[in-house]
Amino acid sequence: MPLSMSGMPLTKFLLQEQRKHADSSGSFTSLFSDIIVAAKLISRAVNKAGLIDILGAAGGKNVQGEEVQKLDEFANTAMLHTMELSSFVLGMASEEMDDIVKMGGPHSRGNYLILFDPLDGSSNIDVNISVGTIFSILKTPNGHDGVTEKDFLRPGVEQVCAGYVLYGSSTMFVYTTGNGVHGFTLDPSVGEFLLSHENIRMPERGKIYSINEGNSAYWYDGTAKYIEKLKSNGSGYSARYVGSLVADFHRNLLKGGVFLYPADKKSKKGKLRLLYEANPLSFIVEQAGGMSSTGDNRVMEIVPEELHQRVPLIIGSKADVQEAVGCWRAAQ
C-alpha cells in the first residue's frame, strides 16, 4: 500500500485491492458497491429526519420485542431492495426480521451471505444522536445450491468482511476484509466516500470506559469491581456512554478505551446480538489491534445456535479488555 492514499474514493480503493488477487472474479467488489449505495440512501434519510415524516415509532415490534422505529423500517428496506437484484448475494439476515431472506435467481454467480443491523441506536435519532448500520459478510459453504438458516450460523472467524456506517456529524464507512481497517468519509458535494482514515490502529490502552451505569444494580461482582477500579482516584479514566453501540465503538476505535455490555442478573445471556453486532465489531477491533470477549470466551470463536442469539460483550483496546476480563474471571 502506498504511504498515503488519502482522498481516494472507496470504489477505486476496492478495485485497487481486487487487483492484488489474481483469482478475483470481481463479485465481491460488485456486492460491496451495492452496500455503498444502501449506505448513501440511509444517510440521506437520516440527514432529512427532521424534515420528513420518518421520525418516531412505526407502530410495531421486531423479533427482539423492541419497538420498531420508522427509520429502522426504512434502513432495513433500503438494504433489502438494494441487494435484491444482485446476482452475488444468495441470502440475507437482518436483526429486524424473524427469518432469513433467500435471494439470487437461476443466473446467480455469487455465494455470499449478508447479516446486518440496519440502524443501530435508532431510538436516539429523534434527539440527533449518531446511529449506524452494521454488517457482516460470509461465504455460503454450499456454493450456488441455495441457502438455509444453518448457513448463517457460523463463528465470527469465518467472516470475509465486516463493517459499519456511522451517521453522525459526517457519514463514515469503516470496514475490514482481514487486511487492516480503513475508514472513508462521505463527501456530500460529490456523493463519494473518500479515504480519510487509513489503516486504523487502536491504542494499546485507552482512557475511556463505556457502560450503562443505570444497570449497576444488576451487575455481577466482576463488573462492579472493574468499574470501581476505573473510577478510583488517579485512574485517569473518563466515562463516555452514548447509548448507540456503533457510536461508542467508533469513538473508542479511534481514541482507545473499552465498551462493556456484560452479562448481569437481568440479562444473564447478554443483550447484544452475536451475528449482527458482536461478531462484525469483533472482527474490526481485532484487525485494528484490539480485543473482544464475552468475559469467558473470545467472541469470534462462538458457534451460533440461533439467528438472533445474544451475548455479553467487552470490546476495545487490548490492555483494557484484558484487565476487564481478568476482574470478571477472578470474581467467578
Image (cartoon, rainbow, N blue to C red):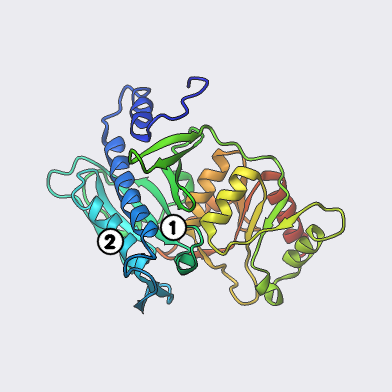
Which quadrant of the view contains residue 94? bottom left
Which quadrant of the view contains residue 220? bottom right
In what element is the residue under mark 1?
A: helix
Percent x, y of residue 93:
33, 59
Percent x, y of residue 83:
25, 51
Q: Can residue 280 be seen in this view?
A: yes
* Depicted 234 relative to depicted 60: above or below: above
Residue of label 1 = 276
Residue at x 30%, y 35% (from the top left corner): 29
Specify the amino acid type for callout 1: Tyr
Residue of label 2 = 77
Which quadrant of the view contains residue 28? top left
* Near-viewer residue (117 or 187): 187
265 sits to left or right of 278: right
231 sits to left or right of 325: right
Q: Residue furthest top?
A: 2
Percent x, y of residue 95:
39, 64
* Near-viewer residue (210 or 221): 210
Q: Can residue 141 be seen in this view?
A: no
Q: Distance between the residues labelled 2 and 1?
A: 16 Å
Specify the amino acid type for callout 2: Thr
228 sits to left or right of 47: right
